[in-house]
Image (cartoon, rainbow, N blue to C red):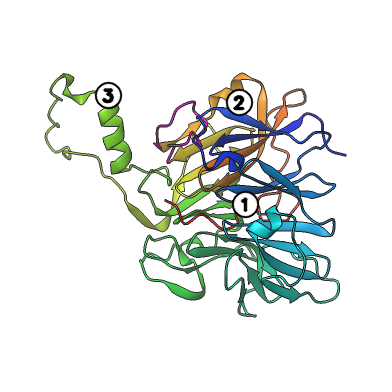
Amino acid sequence: MADPRRSWFLFGLNAEEAAGAPGPGRQRLGLKGAVIRRVCPAWSCAVLDTGSGLQLLSAGRRRPLPEDCTAALPSETHVVLLRGAAVQAWPLAAALRDELRGEPAWSRELPPGARPALPLLPGGFVAPRPPFYTALPRETPLRALALGHEHAVGLGQAGEVYGWGAGRHGQLGHGSLESEQQPRLVEALCGLPVREVAAGGWHSACISDGGDLYVWGWNESGQLGLPSRAVAEQQGEDEDVGAGLQDPPLPGEPPGAAFISIQAFPALLDLPMEPAVAAVSCGSRHTAAVTRGGELYTWGWGKYGQLGHRDRASCDQPRRVEQLRAQGLQALEVVCGPWSTYVCVLQQGGAQGSHPHSTAPALKAGTERGSCPGELSPHP
């Protein structure tokens, strides 16, 4: 039975109002008479799992998905549905009109007894856009998979990490900007047991068994939590730098900060005051992490208020979301949409200091944890 103290909040672009410009406030997700268990967002739509059925939200419309659907992956063009012994892809417009009849855009039968955790399928994986299905090498069995806009990050059975797809922003973690057609082991993480992976638009992240957070890929908006020139320039404009002359650098001191645009190898990222990370999720150009102590940290692009800091500023350092802490809300899970952040919270009332999922396996679509990396928007 669901805990009535659990609830979901949204920061940033509301999938139901994607055509407008919602402010940077916090919005509570609610379905009358239902408790939300999982959230799977795309740019302008999201799928909510209430435990008694799935609902598709977009542009103010809410449509229940067929009763035999147990998991879904939405995108801007299609929605992939796990229905009984088959996986199907339907046009998003048809799903919003409740017209899931006739022949789907794509379908694949599952072996008897198969219970896949989307996007993983027996022998491969599915994405909510053509060509939908991609086969995986038999010698690379995965237990979790995160899909970015142009790349994928997989978690092997022994905790090893694989990266493949487009690599021009260093998002594969191989130390180069080359693309890879097949899963390739991220050698920099060899020997480090990993329990969770995440993929954003053009960046990636993972969490070790010990709760250490590693990030790599594009850092244009500070989404890696590393010094970003764009963020520094934005902050400089906001601070009215013309008020006076700055002190010159000391002898031997570099004239400016060492900005990082691309981090092609995994880099260890420490969160202020919080040694261990329990969950991580990546948006198009922002990142969110939940600590084992139940705190939510966010960083990266913040134009739509998706960082939850009551402003629209971007940030290239992990920053705690204080409004949750101030209201006695403990973060349990986090799922990033391209321009949004969904967080599951628990009203404080029990013991603090231990995260209920700190030893759980990696987040992936369709699992009990409820994260769904999904496909990211082609928008910036």
Asked whether the residues under the numbered discs 3 and 2 touch, taking CB atoms below 8 Å apart as contact, a structural biologist would say: no
Mark 2 residue element? helix
Q: Earlier in the sequence, mark 3 or mark 2?
A: 3
Mark 3 residue element? loop
Which kind of residue does numbered mark 2 sit on? Answer: Leu
Q: Which residue is mark 3?
A: 239
* Label 1 environment density (alpha carbons within 10 Å; few <14, some 14–19, many ≥20): many
Q: Which residue is mark 1?
A: 209
Examine the rendered structure and indicate whether residue 68 appears above or below residue 317. below
Quarter holding residue 324: top right
Q: Which residue is mark 2?
A: 324
Q: Earlier in the sequence, mark 1 or mark 2?
A: 1
Return the x and y of residue 211 as percentages of the image width and height: 59, 46
Return the x and y of residue 216 as percentages of the image width and height: 43, 54
* Residue at (85, 75) in percent of width and height: 112
The range drawn in magenta is 301-315
* Residue at (35, 66) in percent of width and height: 177
Asked whether the residues under the numbered discs 1 and 2 touch, taking CB atoms below 8 Å apart as contact, a structural biologist would say: no
Q: Main secondary structure of the magenta part?
A: loop
